[in-house]
Amino acid sequence: MNSAAWRNNFRFWVPGTVVFVLMSVLLSVFVLRFSDAAAVAQARLTRRAEELDSVRARRLQAEEAVERIRSSEAGLAEFYGGRLSSESRSLTAIIGEIKDLAARAGIPPGALSYDRERLEGQDVARRSIRFAVNGSYQQLRQLINFFELSDSFLILDEIGLSSNDVEGPLRINLQLSTLFTVGSQDGSEPAANLES
């Protein structure tokens, strides 16, 4: 086509060209705005995903902490219910075990004395048991080993040598203690010396 034809038919191609240019401009503006909005939305989505990961990690930590607390509570309940019992139920058995272990080591104890104290802020009382034994070094080591291997809750508080005779048997003063649940008792029972 020549230029005269273009000029003569301008009313057909000019509106189409104007519409095309306007649509191109609008499309460019829309694409620019949409890409900015898409970038903002993507950044927001990334931030939310990171927040969600953080919340999930904190929830997992909280669940683990709750599980540790439940496990600790179960362990404490088992300790108080299984390993510790009331003094009236277990003291005789523990004294019997101490005497039995000493006899197995070949050095039966003499008289036993007892002290009792309530542990501050706890439903637990501590009973100390003192006694002396005479025997060889090996027998004393074996006795201490028996105490350490005992299933009872025995604490070896003190060991004191009270014999100067190098040739003869050693005399050792021992103090063991154990714990008991006390419930609502006041724990102020005075110390007692009992001959066993």
Image (tube, rainbow, N blue to C red):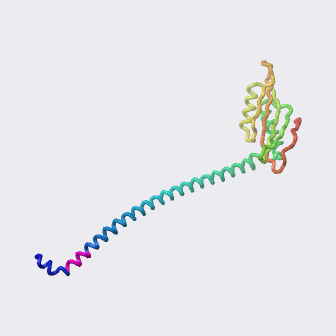
Residue 165 lies left or right of residue 52; in this view the side is right
Image mark count? 0
Pick the front one: 148 or 37: 37
Task: Find out whether residue 49 is within the magenta segment.
Answer: no
Locate residue 68, reporting x and y percent: 63, 51
Pick the front one: 124 or 134: 124
Residue at image location 87% in from the left, 38% down from the top:
191
| Vertical position of residue 11 compared to residue 157: above or below | below
Residue 144 sits in which quadrant? Answer: top right
Residue at image location 84% in from the left, 45% down from the top:
187
| Vertical position of residue 33 compared to residue 112: above or below | below
Locate residue 106, reporting x and y percent: 79, 30
Residue 107 lies left or right of residue 67; in this view the side is right
Q: Main secondary structure of the magenta part?
A: helix
Q: Which residues make up the magenta segment? A: 12-19
Pick the front one: 75 or 43: 43
The image quadrant where one finds the C terminus is top right
Locate residue 7, reporting x and y percent: 14, 78
